[in-house]
Image (cartoon, grey):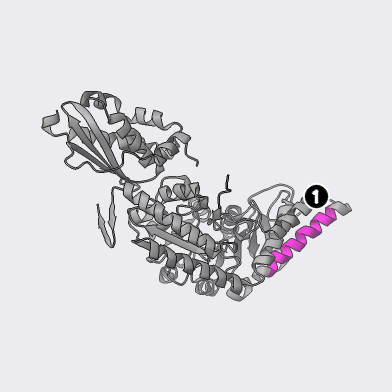
Amino acid sequence: MEKQKIVYLDNASSSQMSNEVYREMIDAYGSLYANPASIYKAGRDAENALLSAKTKIAKAIGASADEIVLTSGESESNNLAIKGIARANRNKGNHIITSVIENESVLESCRALEKEGFKVTYIPVDENGVVKYSEIVKAMGPDTILISISVANHEVGTVQPIRAIAELAKANDVIFHTDASYVIGMIDLNVKEIGIDSLSLSASKFNGPMGVGALYVKKGTDLERLIDGDLAEDSYRAGMVNVPAVVAMGKAIEDATLNVEERSKYLKSIRRYFLKKASEAIHNISLNGHPSQRVANNASVSFEGADGEAIAVMLDREGIYVSTSSSAASKNDKPSYVLKAMGKELEVAQSTVRFTFGMSTTREDIDYVVEKLRKIVKKVRSISAIRIYKNKVEL
Amino acid sequence: MAYSDEILNEFFNTENVGVIKGADGVGKVVCPDCGAIMKIYLLTEKDLIKEATYQTYGCVAAIASCQVATKMLIGKTIEEAEKTVNEKAILKALGKVDESKKKFAKMASETVASALKNLSKKSK
């Protein structure tokens, strides 16, 4: 039987490790087994490996190794940053600013803080998913202690004006946190130059292993830890980290940030090719998010009259892996809160598929995907109670 | 969340999709939460349901629910259909259904009820 072709286009959810990263991790599993907090040589070896990985992570974002806290990934980094900063700075104020389209780990952390008496302003976005800067300015007050806005949205890929937000935060002595999980290797980030006080990242989004991430916290920033216990390794997080996975994360971020411009250029060319081919083959489709101010690997596409999940399940059968909107939204039946916040109709939100390309995606892959997609969208539209004709929709 | 084999089987075998021109009864239900739309068409002969088709704008579970419901309707008398083609029967036919997707079995049964209610007098 012929082996089915596999095209993985869900890289914003989790991405495949390169052979080099994988090998480095496997080697580390064989050799770095000792507790990095122990006094003997095997422990020191593990500790040195952690320091080396932290140094690589720090270098990639313009920080120093002692400003890196190792975590289990994006959700923990965001929880630690938002809850940790808010609780540690409560004596200065109790107001937090974020946006309505942040990752759920940011939004849920904010909701948890509201129950503790913090006040949170959720800033709206425009039709392209750009956070309204003027609303942030309006929301700033004497009690504001933290602003948390991601570098780019996880679902539609819109890049936010974080430079201006960082400047605003600095001018008002407010801490600025950003979730950079979706942009590593595609946007050059220097936390010192931009003025970022705290930044979340997740290894599985840049070809590193799952279940490991990091939080950058600028020296001197007050942060209350979430996990108590043995603090031998880090005063911000108790518990032993997964040393081999951290080693792999170090290698992955080093590789991803080696030539950001080249990576970004390649991913943009693949997306451009996909959008051109898809819009030639399928009528009544639209790209969600900002047309140009967007992360290089994201194409959030709505197929009028065809349910996104139905498309995704049919693509799965052809060996093509995508998600309906955000990876979390694929698991429940709620329409995307991001698309809703952008003013999209329910039907448009439900007809959306998120394609996120990787460095291993080729034009041949895209040709295969578009050919399957054309047939599948036609099939799903033939089932649909919404009749779609070229530039005409009937309910 | 992975769908059961039963749901996927119905989803990939949508033989009852379509419109019946001159249908005796049509039911339509729209979900205000997610935007799903279900339409069921019935063709009857005396008190017997000869044909049942559907059109669904919605997820895999929504489509599978309509496929199951229309399969159940075909060949039944109107009275039998009213009594037996319900949420419970559709859910049973779908196998294991995630909690968040159970509403589509209910929605399909409501669409069936609406189509049966709208049957023209000639067939009642």
Q: Which residues are magenta?
A: A43-59
**Helix, strand or loop status at disc 1:** helix
Residue B44 in which image quadrant: top left
Asked whether residue B100 is drawn in magenta, I would say: no
Observer able to see residue A384: yes
Q: Name the residue at the front extreme.
A: A1
* A138 versus A365 height, above or below: below
Q: Nearer the viewer, residue A28 or A356?
A: A356
* A143 versus B83 height, above or below: below
Q: Looking at the picture, how far across and down is residue A121, in whole percent? A: 44, 60
Q: Name the residue at the left extreme.
A: B122
Q: Residue at x 34, y 57 (%)?
A: A304
Q: Looking at the picture, how far across and down is residue A293, in whole percent? A: 47, 71
Residue A343 in which image quadrant: bottom left
Q: Left or right of B104: which side holds A155? A: right
Q: Dot 1 corresponds to which residue?
A: A30
Q: Name the residue at the right extreme.
A: A40
Observer able to see residue A96: no
Q: Looking at the picture, how far across and down is residue A324, in whole percent? A: 45, 52
Q: Residue at x 72, y 50 (%)?
A: A242
* A321 versus A298 height, above or below: above
Q: How many marks?
A: 1
* Quadrant (top left/top right/bottom left/bottom right) for the N terminus of chain A: top right
Q: Left or right of A220: which side holds A42? A: right
The prevailing secondary structure element of the residues shown in magenta is helix
Q: Looking at the picture, how far across and down is residue B67, in whole percent? A: 34, 37
Residue A61 in which image quadrant: bottom right
Q: Nearer the viewer, residue B92 or A42?
A: B92
**Circle 1 Cα neighbour tier, 10 Å, few/some/many (<14 / 14–19 / ≥20):** few
Type of amino acid under label 1? Gly
Chain to which mark 1 belongs: A
